[in-house]
Amino acid sequence: MNPNNSNTFNNEFYAPTDLFAAAAATEERAGFITKTYFYLVGAVLSMVGLEILYFNLLGMEQAKLIAGTMTNGFMWLVVLGLFMAVQWVADTWARNAANPIMQVAGLALYAVVASIVLFPLLTIALLVGNGPQIIVSAGWATGGLFALMTLTVFITRKDFSFLRTFLMFGGLAALGLIILAVVFGFHLGPIFIYAMIALACGYILYDTSNVLHHYRIGQHVAASLALLASLFILFWYVLQLFLSSRE
């Protein structure tokens, strides 16, 4: 309980920020959910804007050079390692109950770094025939899957927290396979892509059910960051699926 919120407990119109959203009154719970998805949409639009900015500033030739450098052998493992470290920092900031500005800074940090990690894949997509349309189609497909998973949770009201162990081990196994693929230079193939799309959908079910059942009223930024991370993974592999179909 945050002592700085003592005045909040005496005001019937506000819920204490350490109260679980599931236990809050209908208006407070609705406000928490609205803010969570508001921040999520804002982060997604920010990432889209950053990608447009990168390509406008760099041009395709420079973009190809940077993308090639980032994905060249062991450099890609360095990029992924740094990305995971930044994600941990961003999540820590987003969960800082005492500092709302740091919460938003954590979400912004993740959005910026994720847009940089996504840049090479988008560059590859733009270099194939009808590249922009592939990216747009992958975006719509990702949005459709995300909406389907979200509606599943909101309609059933089911708590998918039981997926945590499966998702954790699935993520570790996927990371191990990616490392092995880079080290030994083999292609993971379409089965891995389908498995990762399924894993990302599982994460969306898990994160969305946490929004309904396990986050506290003041954790809307942390909730939006978790959803953004799962949405990022889903888009990454959906886009790869579209690209592999072109090949």
Image: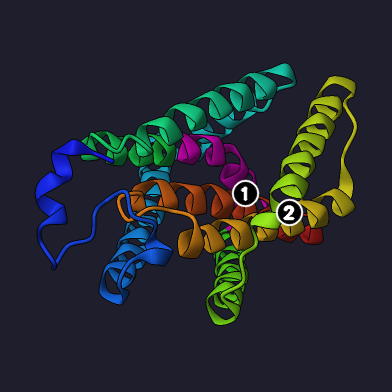
The answer to whether one can see residue 130 in this image is no
Name the image quarter holding residue 181: top right
Residue 233's mark?
Answer: 1
Figure check: 200 above or below 144: above
Task: Determine the main secondary structure of the stretch shown in magenta.
Answer: helix
Q: Which one is nearer the viewer's eye here, 103 or 73?
A: 103
- The amino acid type, in three-letter code, at marker 2 is Leu
Figure check: 149 above or below 218: below
Give the residue drawn at x 67%, y 28%.
Answer: 71
* Residue position marked by numbered label 2 in the rendering: 199
Mark 2 and mark 1 lie on one chain; the one further toward the N terminus is: 2
Name the image quarter holding residue 155: bottom right
Residue 51 is situated, as x and y percent measured from the top left of the image, at: 43, 46
Residue 61 in the magenta stretch? The answer is no
Give the residue drawn at x 32%, y 34%.
Answer: 96
Residue 171 is situated, as x and y percent measured from the top left of the image, at: 73, 40
Give the residue drawn at x 88%, y 47%.
Answer: 189
> What element does badge 1 sit on?
helix
Name the image quarter holding the C terminus: bottom right
In the displayed structure image, the side of residue 62 where residue 163 appears, left or right: right
The answer to whether one can see residue 157 in this image is yes
Confirm or deny contact between disc 2 and disc 1 (CB under 8 A): yes
Residue 44 is situated, as x and y percent measured from the top left of the image, at: 41, 55
Magenta span: 113-131
Q: Which one is nearer the viewer's eye here, 213 or 7?
A: 7
Q: Residues within 10 Å of mark 1 (few under 14, many from 20)?
A: many
Residue 117 in the magenta stretch? The answer is yes
